[in-house]
Amino acid sequence: MPELEEQKTLESGYVTLEDLRRHGNIPPDEVLESRAVPIFDCIEEIPCTPCRDACPTGAVIMPTMNDKPRVNWEACTGCTLCAQACPGLAITIVNIPFGKRVLKDPTKALVSVPYEILPIPKKGEKVALYDRGHRYLGEGEVFSVIRSYKYGTVLVNVVVPKEIALEVKFVEVVRDE
Amino acid sequence: MIGKCSQCLMRVNGYPHVRTCITPVEDGMIVEYEEGHDAELPLPTKEMLVKREDLEYDIAVIGAGPAGLSAALEASSMGARVLVMDQSPVPGGQLVKQTHKFFGTKETFAGMRGFEIAKMLTDKLKERENVDVMPSTQVIGYFKREGSLAAFRTEGLGRYTLLRIRARSIIVATGAMERSLVFPGNDLPGVMGAGAAQTLMNVFGIRPANEPLIIGAGNVGVIVAYQAVQAGIRVKAVIDIAKKSAAYLVHSSKIRRMGIPILMRHTIREAYGKGRVEGATIYKVDDNYRPIKGSEVDIEVDGVWLAVGLTPSIEVLELMEAGIKFVPELGGYVPMRHRNLETTVPGVFVAGDASCIEEASTAMMEGRVAGIAAAMRAGLGGDEHVKKMKETIRWLDEFRSSPHYRRIREGLFKVTLEGGAS
């Protein structure tokens, strides 16, 4: 069956959460619950290395340029540089403990979404949350915006319900007409 | 909009058939539609000056895109006197409209955007005294016996300089031209190459459509769809007759999450509208690419953008009588070449899309190989340059070892000759 599933993904044109689990791109629960982690929507062997080159701790493992990136969860500090550097905008940073530790609300999590469309969402703005196939997931709020001068891709940090943190992949500002 | 097709031909200041997409605007210019192709060549006037120049260089590079600029950088750093010509008034080739960050590795400036790479390469060349970059210059002939090129430089409308260029080596980095598709209504205004739409959006700041349909879900189609969204355009759909998209999943995922449908096994029946595209009929095909009855759907669109592949521009190589072979995997007719990218004409090298339709990253690396090899042909360089060329070839081999480049590998196997540096 996995092969058939793979085919479906290729036809639909996007990577699903199930694909990512199968490829080992989703960390174990204890890791997810304890720190910020990058989720790489990158499961093909393509010649591309900016994530590896941006990683300050060597946590992105990619022996040759065509290898799929693998993350050493122990070495990763959740610094977000890979997400800023990725030319495919394929990496989100999922920070589940952020809800409990910073917001004092364990039902929430923080997701950093790479963003390249003007206008850039602003702190405090409401955003519509979408999954990988543009399914509407609900509303989130912009906590902060990281403007990456080195890598040029903005990261929008969004507070979302914890249970959909792994699904959020795109946001759109909700503006009153 | 890459200066090669004839779709932008207009009458300018009375001159017929002017390629408006590569002609800079001047004050007081009169630009008119041409009805049919019955325009007459205007008689020479006093202003229509043709001058003559004789030039001599170690290396002549035809094309100032990623391949040509990289070749010029390598060759000039080995001490060669280099001339880079390009038909466009602005150097950079197709890099100038690439607003997305590039894949690849540090060697090919991965993470930088295409237009930034164009600027960086051009700026570097400007600093070098032994390099001349000559825009608005088209090569039109090759004189075999003396090994020289004929070209003309457009100084303004109707003002040309005819050039004879002698060079010890020549690098052909002429790029490629977008393919079109045959369907009723494909001549309606609003139907254009995806590259043309990209030029209008990203170089000229013009919105070519509000709700276009894109044909072709390869990397070009999905990247242009993404850039259209960035330009505030609502892409109706990206369709492709193939069963599976040839694009990198990361690229297609990017537009799917923004809600742009990708319809595989779909193609266009016709585009229609009064005076411009107002809609298109698309249909689904079965496993044998035959239309499925009853699958026709009319969609309201005001543009149809074609991202259906590219054809290498090899006209200059044909003039030179270089060995040419038809290799569909590489985009059509392409020159035979050695590993160091020398063609069957000694001293003539090829690099970039003219050698094989691929990526800007590989074009830059091929340019470096050709640049080093051409400079060595001209008697420059030493062991360290042989080593550098071999390393660059190794990088190309590694890049192409991705499953995405299987067809490229097979194609290259058919046109690569024994001998030359490897």
Image (cartoon, coloured by chain):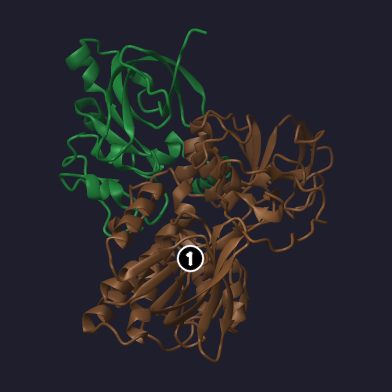
x and y percent of residue B336 in the render? 54, 81
x and y percent of residue B361 in the render? 40, 59
Relative to B340, is B191 on the left or the right?
right
Question: Dividing the picture into quarters, in which one does residue B77 lie?
Answer: bottom left
Closer to the camera in the image, A113 or B317 = B317
Residue B264 in sight here: no
Residue positioned 40% across, 71% down in the render: B83
Looking at the image, the residue that sits furthest to the top is A176
x and y percent of residue A137 in the render? 46, 19
Relative to B176, is A146 on the left or the right?
left
Instruction: Residue type at mark 1: give it.
Output: Gly
Closer to the camera in the image, A72 or B242 = B242
Residue B219 in sight here: yes
Relative to B1, is A51 on the left or the right?
left
Colour of the chain lettered B: brown
Residue positioned 29% across, 28% down in the render: A94
Closer to the camera in the image, A44 or B297 = B297
Relative to B128, is B7 on the left or the right?
right
Closer to the camera in the image, B116 or B270 = B116
Label 1: chain?
A: B
Question: Dividing the picture into quarters, in which one does residue A35 lie?
Answer: top left
Letter of the green chain: A
Secondary structure found at label 1: loop
Q: In this view, does A32 lie above or below B139?
A: above
Looking at the image, the residue that sits furthest to the front is B46
Residue marked by disc 1: B63
Q: How many labels does the image show?
A: 1
Q: Quarter holding the C terminus of chain B?
A: bottom left
x and y percent of residue B241 in the render? 68, 49
Question: Dividing the picture into quarters, in which one does residue B65 lie?
Answer: bottom left
Q: In this view, does B1 lie above or below B160?
A: above
